[in-house]
């Protein structure tokens, strides 16, 4: 679908400042939304809000449906009367530009159980009705996820395919026994998802009431160690013992001589199609309820995907396999109606990918940092954009624009200076200006670029497994942004909207 001409900011909630070691859905999140409103921006884009797995990556999750419980704000729990001032003060941590996830998780675990116990002890009839409605509406994933998390804790967070074989194979009598044995933990996990949903719905409403749309992110693949694979083994390329057989990745290219072996189990597309793609339909419905639009990661994988045997150590020995992209999206379109989707169509894109993207009128992504490594035909240069696209200076996987400029070749730097008719001193603002003035319907910029930060403040370095997803800003950094300059560019580029007064 086409989106209105608009502009916004990319920032993940974990990057917000705050007192608990990582950003969350509390007061600081609303401060950020207030910044968007003051500067006439109308988009907030986030990374996946699902539970983080290995390396704290939001793209490696225990569930494609559940929320990251550590985004629950202790301050909001305090306002609800579920935590005392003393209890939230006891878990406070220094606030700086690096998240302390381990300490934050440990501290929050202590008080979440207290809050849960108080909720059930003192819940009103209205709260009970809301809780039961949530569990009923989300039963299709919540029951399995809550049991999965209870079992994971019981087995010291070891991968599910290493648990006792009876629970690995989900024998009905064993499932029943485990549900009874872990009933209190299952209740706790369900409440955490209920509270996550409540806080997210209120935060999104706060944004929507100020004319701001929230764009979510849906990774194409799911983690092997997830409730999704454990509960739906018939949909994934695993053997009867839960071990991966065929996994995802990308082949060797200019950036890597051995390719990238991601390790996510591939889908059994035939089984999914035979079942009417019900798992995917549920997933998209869930996302459309949680967000105003979604970015679909690795969109190419819906046209064709790189398949590698799980026994391989690199992604070199694999093959391209055709995926049922049109059949899938036709089904989702039929079940969900209009599809507010942005296609992450970066990397080597084939004619088939473009055809699939354009059939459903999904806008693609244009990254300005990719625009200066060749000549004037480069598709990432603004004069080559189509209107139905999204202009970015960079994404969470890129360096900051200042970091990119500082490390780019002199040829690329010269091309960037020539194109922007500048000396490169404020290259981040030059790129923001290019994106704003382009014909792209949407222009979105990482918050770091509005702040003019260098490469020390990037969010992620693809292909590395440590020291990623940690970046946070401080209140002072947000206050230092030249808000007037943003307002001028938005007005100049006709990206403002008339807000309700």
Image (spheres, helix red, strand yellow):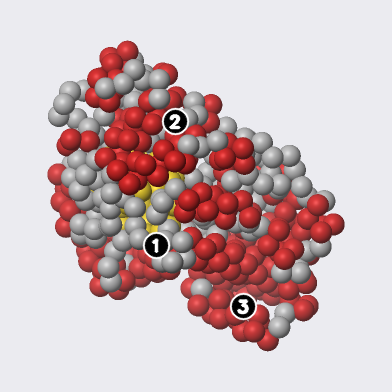
Circle 1 packing at 10 Å, graded few (<14), some (14-19), many (20+), is: few
Q: Position of residue 310 (x, y in %)?
A: 41, 42
Q: In the rendered image, is residue 266 in sight? A: no
- CA distance for labels 3 and 2: 42 Å
Which quadrant would residue 473 be assigned to in this image? top right
Q: Position of residue 294 (x, y in %)?
A: 37, 57
Tell me the SS state at disc 1. loop
**Which of the pair 42/224 is nearer the observer?**
42
Q: Position of residue 247 (x, y in %)?
A: 39, 45
Q: Quadrant of the N terminus?
A: bottom left
Which quadrant would residue 384 be assigned to in this image? top left
As drawn, the residue found furthest toward the top would be 410
Give the mark nearer the N terminus: 1 vs 3. 3
Circle 3 packing at 10 Å, graded few (<14), some (14-19), many (20+), is: some
- CA distance for labels 1 and 3: 34 Å
Q: Which residue is mark 2?
A: 400
Q: Residue at x 41, y 50 (%)?
A: 41
- CA distance for labels 1 and 2: 31 Å
Q: Residue at x 30, y 39 (%)?
A: 435
Tell me the SS state at disc 3. helix
Mark whose residue sits in front, 1 or 2: 1
Q: Quadrant of the C terminus?
A: bottom left
Q: In the rendered image, is residue 28 in sight? A: yes
Give the mark nearer the N terminus: 3 vs 2. 3
Q: Which residue is mark 3?
A: 131
Q: Position of residue 245 (x, y in %)?
A: 40, 48
Tell me the SS state at disc 2. loop
Give the mark nearer the N terminus: 1 vs 2. 2
**Which of the pair 111/32 is nearer the observer?**
32
Q: Residue at x 69, y 44 (%)?
A: 21
For residue 148, above or below residue 108: below
Q: Which residue is mark 1?
A: 499
């Amino acid at each position: 679908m086409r989106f209105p001409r608009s502009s916004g900011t990319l920032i993940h909630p974990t990057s917000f400042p705050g007192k608990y070691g990582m950003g969350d859905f509390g007061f600081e999140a609303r401060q950020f939304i207030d910044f968007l409103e003051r500067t006439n921006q109308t988009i907030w884009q986030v990374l996946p809000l699902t539970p983080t797995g290995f390396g704290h990556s939001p793209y490696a999750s225990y569930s494609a449906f559940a929320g990251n419980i550590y985004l629950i704000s202790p301050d909001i729990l305090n306002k609800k009367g579920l935590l005392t001032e003393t209890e939230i003060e006891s878990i406070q941590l220094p606030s700086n530009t690096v998240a302390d996830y381990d300490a934050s998780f440990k501290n929050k675990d202590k008080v979440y159980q207290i809050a849960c116990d108080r909720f059930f002890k003192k819940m009103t009839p209205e709260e009970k009705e809301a809780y039961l409605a949530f569990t009923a509406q989300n039963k299709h994933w919540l029951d399995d996820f809550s049991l999965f998390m209870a079992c994971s804790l019981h087995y010291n967070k070891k991968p599910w395919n290493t648990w006792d074989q009876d629970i690995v194979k989900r024998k009905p009598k064993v499932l029943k026994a485990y549900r009874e044995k872990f009933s209190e933990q299952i209740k706790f996990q369900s409440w955490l998802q209920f509270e996550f949903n409540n806080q997210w719905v209120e935060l999104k409403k706060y944004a929507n009431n100020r004319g701001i749309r929230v764009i979510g992110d849906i990774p194409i693949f799911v983690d092997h160690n997830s409730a999704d694979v454990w509960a739906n083994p018939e949909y994934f390329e695993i053997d009867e013992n839960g071990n991966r057989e065929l996994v995802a990745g990308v082949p060797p290219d200019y950036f890597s001589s051995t390719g990238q072996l991601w390790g996510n189990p591939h889908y059994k597309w035939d089984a999914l199609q035979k079942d009417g793609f019900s798992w995917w339909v549920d997933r998209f419905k869930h996302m459309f309820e949680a967000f105003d639009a979604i970015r679909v990661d690795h969109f190419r994988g819906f046209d064709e995907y790189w398949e590698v045997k799980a026994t391989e150590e690199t992604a070199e020995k694999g093959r391209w396999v055709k995926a049922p992209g049109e059949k899938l999206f036709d089904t989702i379109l039929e079940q969900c109606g209009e599809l507010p989707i942005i296609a992450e169509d970066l990397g080597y894109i084939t004619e088939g990918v473009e055809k699939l993207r354009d059939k459903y009128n999904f806008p693609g992504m244009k990254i300005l940092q990719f625009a200066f490594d060749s000549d004037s035909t480069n598709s990432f240069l603004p004069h080559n954009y189509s209107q139905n696209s999204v202009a970015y200076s960079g994404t969470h996987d890129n360096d900051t624009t200042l970091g990119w400029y500082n490390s780019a070749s002199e040829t690329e730097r010269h091309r960037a200076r020539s194109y922007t008719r500048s000396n490169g001193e404020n290259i981040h603002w030059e790129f923001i200006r290019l994106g704003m003035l382009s014909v792209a319907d949407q222009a979105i910029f990482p918050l770091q670029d509005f702040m003019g930060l260098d490469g020390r403040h990037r969010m992620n370095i693809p292909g590395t497994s440590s020291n990623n997803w940690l970046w946070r800003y401080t209140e002072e950094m947000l206050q230092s942004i030249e808000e007037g300059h943003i307002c001028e560019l938005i007005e100049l580029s006709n990206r403002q909207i008339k807000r309700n007064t």
